[in-house]
């Protein structure tokens, strides 16, 4: 993906990964116009964190997030319950359980466009339940974990950082969330809908999720579709912003 001649994001369409990482398409690296990388993948602490991706911890009991599954009264446990998400065509994806059965189908549209002070990623996705049965979307929170662990949806993992500051609190339903990292770049997320909440981490690791099942499961009746349209404004901060402006708007000699 490019803004002018500047490469700002790479879409990994078909990663060949261990099933325990819940293989799925994702964006990485994502960069500011100044070249700062703002995503991470296969992280040492959570190797199933893959750049920016749509990922859910519980879809009818199947783990499309990766890693251990949170089991009520047992905690995080390794289970043979991982699913995969694969492209069938450029904008159509299929979510399959460990037995190859379709759990969800998805329509996805991703674009990049110039924006004030940087560029904006638009990420739209629509999840449709099979015609024959409902689909229940859950999270560690809906399965009994306390402490605001309702993650699952569009999740963005940032590289390791010294200091990250969020404009809103973990669990907020504010219209937007701005994450500023090491005074080098900022990411402004917009697009919550329904009962969604912002899952945000600035300690331990840095990441943001527009979470779908924050406190209670989200149920899709047979054949119904859940749609989300999110944007992320990617900006350089401080000196990096000046460098980006200089590189994209060079001063011509008189």
Image (spheres, rainbow, N blue to C red):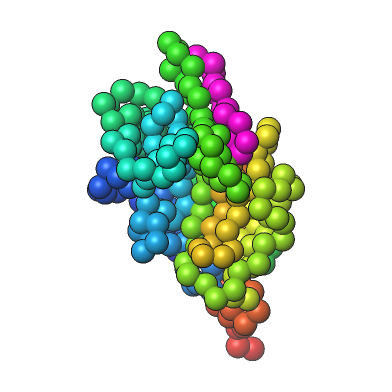
Q: Residue furthest right?
A: 174
Q: Quadrant of residue 246?
A: bottom right
Residue 225 forms part of the magenta stretch: yes
The quarter of the picture where the N terminus appears is bottom left
Residue 212 seen from this side: no
Q: Quadrant of residue 22?
A: top left
Residue 183, horizontal then vertical, whole percent: 63, 76
Q: Residue furthest top?
A: 132
Q: Is 144 located above or below residue 249 in the figure?
A: above
On the rendered structure, is 90 left or right of 172? left
Q: Quadrant of residue 214?
A: top right
Judging depth in this view, the residue of 133 and 80 nearest the camera is 80
Q: Residue at x 47, y 42 (%)?
A: 54
Residue 9, horizontal then vertical, whole percent: 45, 58
Q: Is 241 located above or below residue 146 in the figure?
A: below
On the rendered structure, is 61 left or right of 117? left
Residue 59, horizontal then vertical, whole percent: 44, 30
**Which residues, given as a range, are shown in magenta?**
213-229
Q: Residue at x 57, y 29 (%)?
A: 217
Residue 45, horizontal then vertical, whole percent: 39, 61
Residue 135 seen from this side: yes
Q: Is 62 located above or below residue 162 in the figure?
A: above
Figure disc tally: 0
Q: Residue at x 71, y 48 (%)?
A: 172
The quarter of the picture where the C terminus appears is bottom right
Q: Residue furthest front?
A: 73
Judging depth in this view, the residue of 100 and 69 nearest the camera is 69
On the rendered structure, is 45 left or right of 162? left
């Amino acid at each position: 993906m490019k803004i002018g001649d500047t490469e700002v994001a790479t879409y990994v369409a078909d990663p060949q990964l261990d099933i325990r990482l819940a293989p799925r398409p994702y964006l990485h690296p994502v960069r500011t116009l100044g070249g700062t990388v703002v995503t991470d993948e296969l992280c040492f602490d959570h190797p199933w964190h893959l750049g920016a991706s749509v990922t859910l911890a519980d879809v009818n009991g199947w783990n499309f997030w990766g890693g251990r599954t949170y089991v009520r009264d047992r905690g995080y446990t390794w289970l043979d319950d991982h699913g995969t998400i694969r492209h069938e065509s450029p904008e159509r994806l299929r979510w399959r359980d460990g037995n190859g059965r379709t759990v969800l189908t998805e329509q996805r549209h991703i674009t990049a466009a110039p924006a004030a002070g940087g560029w904006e990623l638009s990420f739209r996705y629509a999840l449709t339940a099979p015609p024959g049965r409902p689909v229940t979307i859950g999270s560690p929170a809906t399965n009994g974990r306390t402490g605001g662990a309702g993650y699952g949806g569009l999740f963005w993992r940032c590289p390791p950082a010294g200091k990250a500051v969020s404009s809103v609190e973990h669990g907020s339903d504010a219209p937007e969330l701005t994450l500023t990292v090491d005074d080098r770049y900022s990411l402004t997320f917009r697009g919550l809908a329904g009962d969604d909440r912002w899952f945000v981490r600035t300690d331990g690791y840095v990441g943001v999720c527009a979470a779908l099942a924050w406190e209670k499961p989200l149920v899709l009746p047979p054949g119904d579709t859940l749609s989300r349209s999110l944007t992320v404004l990617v900006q350089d901060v401080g000196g990096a912003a000046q460098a980006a402006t200089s590189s994209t708007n060079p001063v011509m000699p008189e």
